[in-house]
Amino acid sequence: MIPLIKITDLHVSIDGKPILNGLNLTVNKGEVHAIMGPNGSGKSTLANVLAGREEYTIESGTVEYEGEDLLSMDIDKRALAGIFLAFQYPVEIPGVSNSNFLKSIINAKRTFQGLPELNALEMLKFIRAKLNAIEMDESLLKRSLNDGFSGGEKKRNEILQMTLLEPKLAILDETDSGLDIDALRIVAEGVNQLRSPERSFIVVTHYQRLLNHIIPDFVHVLSNGKILATGDRTLAEKLEVEGYDWIKEPNTVSAF
Amino acid sequence: MLEQEKIIEHLDTVFRDMESRLNGRAGSLMHTLHKASFEALRSTHFPDRKHEDWRYTPVQRLISPKYKLAEKKQQYNISEIPGLDAFKIPVINGHVILDGVDAALKSAGVIIRPLQEAMQSSSPESISSKWLNTAMTTSNQAFELLNFAFHSGGIVIEIPKNLSLSKPIEIQYIHDDPDISFSHPLYFLHAAEGSSVTIIERFEKNISSPDPSVNSLINALAFIHLDKNASVKHIRWQDLPATQSLVYKLTVDQNRDSRLESFAFDFGGELVRNNIDIELDESNTYTSLQAGYLAKRRQSFDHQTRINHKMPHCESHELYKGIIDEQASGAFNGKVYVHPDAQKTNAYQQNDTLVLSSNALMNSKPQLEIYADDVKCSHGATIGQLDEKSMFYLKARGLDPQTAKHMLKAAFLAEVLDNAPVEPLRNYIRSRMSLDA
């Protein structure tokens, strides 16, 4: 079985400054991988590079997604192929109504899949059903996209989009940041409902608390643009107690 | 370079040709005014780029020494705006089609008369005749005089005291002539004390005719007079064929406690010059001018506004938002004068532009002259590109770059469009925008 995504010796820089320094990561179908690490370790860079953000320079290395070269794919094509990035800082776009935006992205996906577009009524029904699951207020649909949303509302809107688009690989970039404990639980439930043998997650987080709700299959510790340690969820718990300082050299800890 | 003499010489021929068709109406009041205006035009040069207010409008592309007057025409067909229920007034090639004027307008209480008739019925209280007479005899603006010399009648619309018109009035302008030609529509709207009305001006093409291959000019004038406590909402929507240009001037005077909201949306045409001139004659008035425009190809859109705050406690707002793409250019010059007596004036002006190509050009010039000391006045201008982070966000959700770009352009103009009255027209403009994606 080919892995869903296979990152090999990835080197990435921004403005000449190296950020990822030979990162290797393989995610198979149905797996949940947590990426932890101190600030500036390259966690968000990894998430953004996979989604196709253009400010980064790929120096070397490969990323295969379903056996294909991901790095040569356009941003929108990656999304249509099933990659979803839940943004750490969702962009506010005044003037684009949230409901129109959701309709457009759902129909773009359906068109790509060769399915007919949903009409207004079907669309509303489809979106409403998912809204309830994440306890999101319907009034947010009428507002401009993320415009003036609270931190929690923005993150819920990200999870809503993820639920609607049903990606194969969801990348959560510090989705827990800025969330209170109730919002965190709701967001985590949204993710857990989507867990399936066909869907994989890369959960980027600084703190262990999200991983109390979303139980990962693997925990990786990223430092200086490299994965220095890999383990199961107990690694996250150890990090919570001992911090990141004890991890200095690659492969000093392995649960396998 | 503008060949002023050549142009005047040519216009002289056109004028004499027009006179030869007067059929015994020579010597009428209208003919006298035509003649006086043409004489004034002779001694008034068309502005060129040395003229500060015309630096950004290529007048030599606007005024051709080949124009003839567009022929009178009765047959026309303009696209329907779904869901819009309005009193229609068709104006084809500068001629008001009186048979086509919605009869329900009269039964709704609106007095509607050809200009000629309104000016001859010299009742002393007739504001329209007094006002137009003054305008026609004192103007020193070349394009205004050109209209006064060549217009073919025009129309006067009077909204009686305290009447709130339930439906908008929709003036439909079409220029449809196979030759290089110009037309000079003209209307005067008088909103009497306590009345309220919404007026739509649509400049579009005759959908029964092929798009014209030769250049033409619509040189339109609109006058709106608001009496005490009157309220006028005005929307100008322009989507002319690519060979047609528009010089438009709206002149407004506002009396005490009156309220004007004016919107302009320009998408089509070649060169568009939009002049708005507001006189605040009395106190406690409200004026809002807003515009949204999308210029491509070699289109040039030039917005010139002048708001004259003469009395205290008046408020004016301007919001001009434009997208300039390809080789197009745009200009905004917002003049606000605050006279010494105009204390407690509140005047705000904003011009925001997206410049989407390295060959596109925008000139933005706020111009506030303030001679009173207890006022709130501010202005701002921004020029930028589409936000990269927003583009990434939309593409990361599977939208192709074209769709994402269009969504952000529409969002940029939405601020103005969402403020505009008449929902069916808003939807129509929105759907028209999506064709431009």
Image (cartoon, helix red, strand yellow):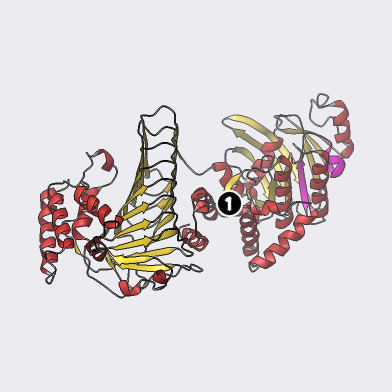
For mark 1, what is the residue?
A96
Q: Residue at x 61, y 44 (%)?
A: A92
In the rendered image, the quadrant that contains the N terminus of chain A is bottom right
Q: Could you tell whether B111 is left or right of A55 in the image?
A: left
The type of residue carrying mark 1 is Val
Q: From the viewer's perspective, is residue B347 above or below residue B8?
A: above
Residue A64 visible in rendering: yes
How many labels, in total?
1
Q: Could you tell whether B3 is left or right of A143 in the image?
A: left
Q: Residue at x 83, y 24 (%)?
A: A246
How packed is label 1: few (under 14 Cα within 10 Å), some, or many (20 or more)? many
Q: Nearer the viewer, residue B212 or B405?
A: B212
- Residue B260, x across and y down, in percent: 43, 50
- Residue B3, x across and y down, in percent: 13, 49
Q: Residue at x 14, y 59 (%)?
A: B32
Q: Quadrant of residue B212?
A: bottom left
Circle 1 sits in a helix, a strand or a loop, which is it?
strand
Q: Nearer the viewer, residue B16 or A178?
A: B16
- Residue B220, x across and y down, in percent: 29, 57
Q: Nearer the viewer, residue B115 or B44?
A: B115
Q: Quadrant of residue A9?
A: top right
Q: From the viewer's perspective, is residue B8 above or below residue B331?
A: below
Is B390 magenta? The answer is no
| Magenta extent | A198-218
Q: Quadrant of residue A163?
A: bottom right
- Residue A202, x across and y down, in percent: 76, 44
The residue sitting at the front extreme is B124
Is A207 magenta? The answer is yes
Q: Could you tell whether B243 is left or right of A130 in the image?
A: left
Residue A1 visible in rendering: no
Task: Identify the chain of the residue marked 1, using the numbered disc in the image.
Answer: A
